[in-house]
Image (cartoon, grey):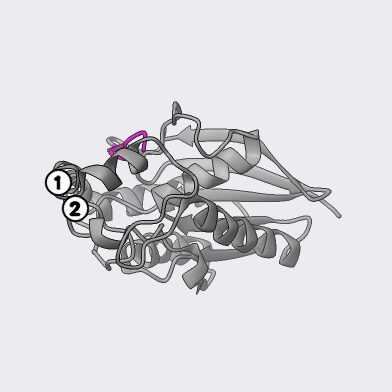
Amino acid sequence: MDATTLCLVRHGETAWNAERRIQGHLDIGLNDTGRAQARATATGLAGERFAAIYCSDLGRARDTASAAAERLTLQPVPMPSLRERHYGAFQGLTYEEARARFPDQYLRFAARDPAFAFSEGGESLETFRTRIAAALEAIARRHAGTRVLVVTHGGVLDIAFRLATGRSLDAPRDFEIPNAALNWIAFEDGRWRLLDWADRRHLAATRDDLPDA
């Protein structure tokens, strides 16, 4: 199989990012900064060539993808499987509120316990990784030997980095995941490898609010 290159982009900033409020599957739109970041990303990618654009079906990712799609003259393909991790009972809370209301769950969350699933329908890291690995591999195999733009979420990029580097799920996150930065990985012979990460030269300002957990 020929190598496929993915350019992964976290959506632009939302008001809840600025408040350190957990979004998960809740559909929160971009704020003014996020819309400016989406336009800057579109400008930064204008000279690139992609075979396709895929995005999470949540509005903050769709709107970020649409800005780039207009410059690249491609139609974004929404994929629910590219959504953020489902944070269950934590969704809608700030990290501080989640720690206060669910102290036992928060300890397992903060420890990156791979088997821990949030109450009220949340995903474990193991389940989340399985979903994201399958989605990214499906895109790579569908567009073998080309370059594809994927606009998604911070948690998804955390999983992608670990897939490309062999980092375990429970290892602390010591890499950045800024809003609207460019992150490049390649898929070849059934394996991922890291090409470049957190390139934000095209952005005047970014916010990296995803905690280590």
Left or right, 39 with respect to 28, comes to right
- Per the model, the C-alpha gap separating discs 1 and 2 is 5 Å
Q: In terms of secondary structure, where does tag 1 sit?
A: loop
Disc 2: which residue: 16
Q: Please name the residue shown 34% across and 57% down the image.
A: 118
- Identified at 69% across, 44% down, the residue is 186
Report the amino acid beneath label 2.
Trp
Counting from the top left corner in percent of width and height, residue 37 is at 31, 48
Query: Which residue has dot 1 on it?
Result: 19
Quadrant (top left/top right/bottom left/bottom right) for the N terminus:
bottom right
Q: Which residues are magenta?
A: 206-213
Residue drawn where x is 62% and y is 43% of the image: 163
Left or right side of 123 for 79:
right
Q: Whole-percent x and y of residue 87?
A: 33, 57
Identify the amino acid type marked 1: Glu
Percent x, y of residue 70? 44, 66
Q: Secondary structure at mark 2?
A: helix
**Residue 114 seen in the current view:** yes
* Vertical comparison of 18 with 118: above or below: above
Q: Is 5 included in the stretch rendered in magenta?
A: no
